[in-house]
Each structure stands twice: as structure tokens, then as C-alpha cells.
Amino acid sequence: MATHLITGAGSGIGAAVTRRLLDRGDELWLLARDAGRAAELRERFEGARSVVGDLGEPERLSWALSQQDLPDRLESLQHIAGVVELGEVGELSAKVWNHTLAANLVAPVELTRLLLPQLRLARGHVLFVNSGAGLRANPQWSAYAASKHGLKAFADALRAEESGNSLRVTSVYPGRTATPMQEKVHRQEGKEYDPARWISPEAVATTLLTALDMPRDAEVTDLTVKPGP
């Protein structure tokens, strides 16, 4: 039985991955921003355990995790949570930039650092749900794209540094996916939201599990997923 720690399990891609891994009998630890959210996740995903830590405050993660039980080893750490706020460069405040970079970049960096001993012990796998915005930056997406470009750079550096410890690192770049975040994006864009037009969370979950389940003699490093024709 493999052990996984997942962020963003409450909705969208994270919920789809969590359900799939639970159904096959793996041990799951779900990161929640507070105790109330942790209780909700445990009730929704029976058998899963929870860890409390606010990705919006990455500088507090070390203290938060030190106060809780953690798994002894991790076959995977899956960074799926994220935030988005659109706006032109002349409109986005420093507060928006700091919040976006904290949740989307600094928190995954810090969480990975803190859990490296467990990952190394299991010769584990770090998976990042990045974004098409991590490969290109479009108008009004500057803060989000910058955070995701940074996440790609971190994943590439981590892969090179940890190859000697047999750690695998995968970045997945989904196009627009039918999630609550996508619905928010459409509201910000002033567009009508039709989830049928976009990738299903289950399809992205399949992509992540495919990378996770590759034989040990292979590693998926970067994978782009786009809406079907």
C-alpha cells in the first residue's frame, strides 16, 4: 500500500485523484487550511487522514507540521491546490501578487522541503499540477503565470538535485479544466462558463496516476494535457 500526501483534495482535480487513490486502497494524507476543513475532508473521504497547514502562509508550515503526526514515508507528494486572480499589470496589487506567489509557488517549495526525508526514504514521487500558464503568459494572467513559471523552474531543479536519491518529479500542464477555479476565471473574464467545453478533472487525474504508476525504470518529467477536439 502506497502513502500519498495531497493538497487541494477538496475539489476539482484534487478530489478526483483522492477518490481514485482511496478506491484502490492507498493511504492518503490530505492537507487542509484549518481544523474545520480537515474534518470536512475526513468525513468526505472516509479512511483518509488530514494535516493542517495554510498554503497562504508558507512561512508557518514548518511550525504547523512539527505539531502534528506525519507519515513515516511518502510514495508521493501531490501539489494540486492553487489560486488565481486575473488582472492587468497596472491593476494587480502587491497583496494579490504576494498571495498568488505564496500559495502557488512558495508553499509547494516549503512543503516539499519539509517532506523530503519521507520522500527520499520511499524513493518517492513529487507531482506538480502546473498549468498551460506555466509555459506561456497571456494578458491579465501575469501573477498566475509567474507563479506557475516559477513552479516549473523549481520542479526542474528538484529533479536534477534529487535524481541521486531516486526521486521522480513530474510537472503536468493541463489546459482549461472544468473545476470551480475555472468557473471563477470565467466570471473574471466576463464569459459564460460551460464545463462541457473543457477537460474533466477525472482526465487530469488519469494523467497524474499514469505518471505515478510508471515502472521504476521510467520517469514522466513534463506532460501537457489539452481539451479534446
Image (cartoon, rainbow, N blue to C red):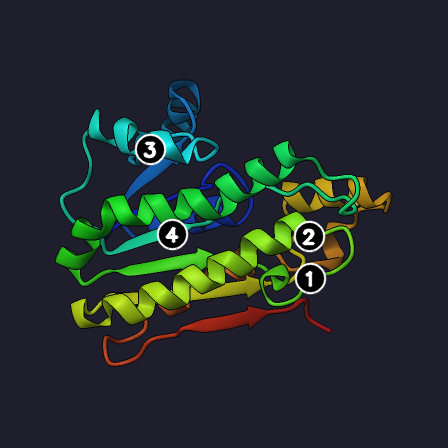
Numbered badge on residue 78: 4
- Left or right side of 3 for 93: right
Nearer the observer, 155 or 129: 155
Q: Residue at x 75, y 59 (%)?
A: 197
At label 1, the amino acid type is Ala
10 Å neighbourhood of mark 4: few (<14), some, or many (≥20)?
many
Numbered badge on residue 142: 2
Q: Nearer the viewer, mark 3 or mark 4?
A: 3
Is residue 223 positioned above or below 62 on the image?
Answer: below
Of label 2 and label 1, which has the lower sequence position? 1
Pointer 1 residue: 137
- Look at the numbered disc 2 and give the secondary structure of its residue: helix
Q: Is residue 45 visible?
A: no
Pointer 3 residue: 61
Of label 2 and label 3, which has the lower sequence position? 3
Position in image of residue 199 (x %, y %): 64, 60
Of label 4 and label 1, which has the lower sequence position? 4
